[in-house]
């Protein structure tokens, strides 16, 4: 598995942050610039020290700390930070370093991309989800209430630095959050990765280089081929049409992690794929059994199904009023732009939340 040229193309480096080009890059290219580090309360507590030990120079950076969590991935958070940046007189040649998970890199990337029509930013993901998915590929943005990622721009960080030692500060639910995206990458594009992950005995095995780099490679290759999501990149949305709606539905009363929602979305969307005769029952069974080993199915009332379907009607991928999904037709291969009838989506949610999943 040759990854290095791909990493270089995507401006990603993996390793101990002290040994990466991070310090020299900011010292050489931004020595006269203002450097702002955007963190949340958790990454300030668990990751900031490691960063300033690795790069002493950052001790004088301006640190902006925002509250953690998806509920703060909002325009209000951006406005507060933009105001601080203005007060600091941050300009076009200055730099923002986003230190955190997907919420920080999405929000911080958007803040940087829009401020004064765009200033440079670097991502240092501290969660598995951030490392495998959110911190590179150019998607930045924030939510509007419980509609996910409704505002945003495509804009790439100057670089992404992945230091897996940050992962050891994470609770299990955060690891599972990223694991869902690894499962997704296997299901849409990599049967070898799938065969590898179904054999793991301990969740921590997913930090091993073979799994980690394979999962990364899937996204880098797809994003390189279609950076603006005009076609192929849409397969990275497998599990997300239904997953985002489930996540949005739970948003106001119970925190369902993004990865957990995507895992549920992958079961529901695989159900749809079997119903339209694309995916075999045998593979569907393997997918359900594997996902259920790691992710619980939450309880909901039947009436909530209509509310989840309603949320899907505002999905970015909809076309001519139709809900569209990326669907797998076999493990390791995915089709995009698949228009799905509302009735079938409802049926898939009933299967997901109200059946014993016997297929
Ligand atoms: N997270 C999906 C994508 O980057 O396209």
Image (cartoon, rainbow, N blue to C red):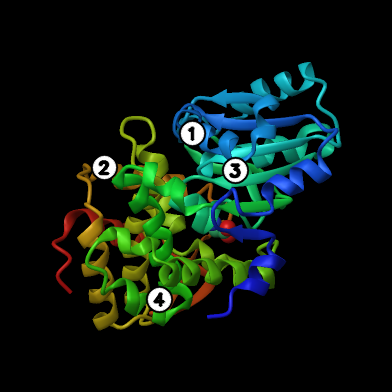
Q: Which residue: 31% across, 58% down?
A: 204
Q: Nearer the viewer, mark 3 or mark 2?
A: 3
* Marks 4/2: CA–CA distance: 38 Å
Q: Which residue is mark 2?
A: 303
Horizontal and vertical percent for residue 13? Answer: 62, 59
Q: Which residue: 35% across, 51% down?
A: 175
Q: Nearer the viewer, mark 3 or mark 4?
A: 4
The image quadrant that residue 31 belongs to is: top right
Task: Give me the disc on residue 235.
Answer: none
Q: Which residue: 36% across, 63% down?
A: 206
Q: Nearer the viewer, mark 1 or mark 2?
A: 1
Q: Which secondary structure, mark 1? A: helix
Q: Which secondary structure, mark 4? A: helix
Task: Give me the disc on residue 193.
Answer: 4
Q: Which residue is mark 1?
A: 43
Task: Give me the disc on residue 106.
Answer: 3
Labelled pair 4, 2 in contact (Cβ < 8 Å): no
Q: Which secondary structure, mark 2? A: helix
Is residue 333 positioned above or below 127 on the image?
below
* Marks 1/2: CA–CA distance: 38 Å
Q: Nearer the viewer, mark 4 or mark 2?
A: 4
């Amino acid at each position: 598995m040759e990854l290095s040229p791909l990493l270089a193309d995507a401006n990603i480096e993996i390793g101990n942050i002290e040994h990466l080009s991070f310090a020299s890059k900011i010292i050489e290219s931004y020595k006269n610039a203002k450097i702002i580090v955007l963190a949340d309360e958790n990454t300030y507590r668990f990751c900031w020290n490691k960063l300033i030990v690795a790069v002493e120079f950052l001790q004088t950076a301006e640190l902006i700390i925002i509250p953690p969590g998806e509920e703060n991935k909002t325009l209000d958070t951006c406005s507060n930070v933009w105001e601080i940046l203005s007060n600091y007189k941050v300009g076009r040649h200055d730099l923002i370093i986003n230190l955190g998970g997907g919420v920080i890199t999405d929000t911080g990337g958007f803040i940087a991309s829009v401020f004064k029509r765009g200033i440079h930013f670097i991502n240092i993901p501290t969660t598995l989800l951030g490392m495998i998915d959110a911190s590179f590929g150019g998607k930045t943005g924030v939510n509007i209430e419980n509609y996910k990622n409704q505002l945003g721009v495509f804009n790439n960080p100057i670089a992404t630095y992945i230091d897996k030692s940050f992962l050891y500060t994470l609770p299990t639910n955060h690891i599972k959050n990223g694991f869902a995206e690894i499962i997704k990458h296997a299901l849409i594009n990599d049967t070898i990765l799938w065969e590898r992950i179904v054999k793991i005995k301990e969740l921590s095995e997913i930090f091993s280089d073979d799994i980690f780099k394979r999962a990364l490679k899937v996204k880098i290759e797809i994003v390189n081929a279609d950076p603006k999501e005009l076609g192929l990149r849409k397969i990275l949305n497998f599990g997300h049409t239904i997953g985002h709606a489930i996540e949005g539905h739970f948003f106001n009363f119970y925190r369902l992690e993004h990865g957990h929602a995507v895992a549920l979305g992958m079961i529901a969307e695989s159900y749809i794929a079997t119903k339209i005769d694309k995916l075999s029952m045998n593979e569907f069974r393997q997918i359900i059994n594997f996902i259920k080993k790691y992710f619980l199915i939450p309880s909901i009332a039947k009436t909530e199904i209509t509310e989840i379907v309603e949320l899907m009607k505002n999905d970015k991928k909809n076309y001519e009023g139709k809900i569209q999904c990326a669907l797998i037709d076999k493990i390791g291969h995915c089709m995009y732009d698949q228009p799905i009838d509302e009735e079938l989506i409802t049926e898939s949610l009933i299967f997901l939340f109200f059946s014993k999943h016997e297929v």
